[in-house]
Image (spheres, rainbow, N blue to C red):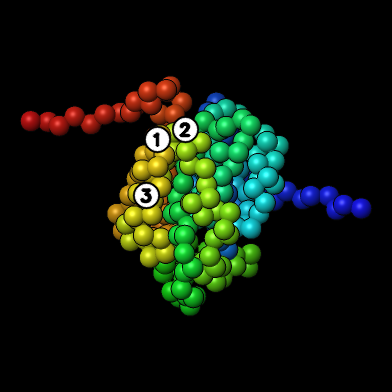
Amino acid sequence: MTEPVTLPAVRTWLPAPELHLRGTVVLFSGRGEHGGVYERLGRRLSADGYAVRAADSTPGDDLDLLTRLVSETPVTDPLVLAGSDTGALQALAVAAASARPPAGVILAGLADLGTPPRLSWDDELDARTACPTHRRRLTEDDRFVRGALSGPPPPALLSAELPLDRIDLPVLLLHGDADPVTAPEVARSIAARLPGAELGIVRGGRHDVLNDIDHRSVAAHIVQWLERLRSGPDRAPVVTVEALS
């Protein structure tokens, strides 16, 4: 008898009842993480009217399983898939395979393609984030898997295997220029192969760019991008800054 398939657990942050629901972000977590580590981002986006559903995904999850998870997730359009590290690669793969493509994709701190060096816990923490609050969160979190960042992404998630030519969607890539795990050139290379891509480089940012020292500015940039996504196909900036003479 076949065992029933269990979907990854999902942590949810919803806007206050009096707010108009402006869209849904489904997020896949990266190596060693679980959905709960994105609480700050979930709370911030939900305060601006977006439902955030962060999955306890792992790098080895079957992509069909993640596609099913998205299809069974309560969604208010526009639907945006997001991910960090290997979760970013999973978001790309699911977006390409889905019978109902999302409106856009957010990729943060893409996983590198090669086998990373084995890191001590102190080195891994330094590579992930400079934010003291998040460093404490990871250190005290008994669900977080230390050392997972030293494991290579599964072959199915390597960029050479991803059907990037089938992703004709708005894509926001966010990457730290001080990321010691994945060089910014990797994000630039992926962005160049995606026709609807925008690349945001975070000054001084490390690998966990959604939970790094400038997480507020990164979250604000995500909200601006989401609002542009809602504005229509031209995605013109809502606010433009004019030079004053």
Residue 98 coordinates in the image, percent (x, y)? 62, 36
> Of the residues shown, which amino acid type is indicated by label 3?
Ser
Q: Is residue 227 above or below residue 125?
A: above
Q: Which quarter of the figure has residue 26?
A: top right
Q: Are marks 2 and 1 in contact (CB under 8 Å)?
A: yes
Residue wearing tag 1: 195
Residue 233 coordinates in the image, percent (x, y)? 42, 22
Residue 43 coordinates in the image, percent (x, y)? 53, 44
Q: Which residue ends up furthest to the bottom in the rendered image?
A: 120
Near mark 1 (Cα within 10 A), the count class, few <14, some 14-19 or many ≥20, is some
Q: CA distance from mark 2 to mark 3?
A: 16 Å
Whichever of labels 2 and 3 marks the residue nearer the N terminus, that label is 2
Q: For this rendering, which residue is in front, 24 or 134?
A: 24
Q: CA distance from mark 3 to mark 1?
A: 12 Å
Residue wearing tag 3: 189
Is 239 placed left or right of 244 in the picture? right
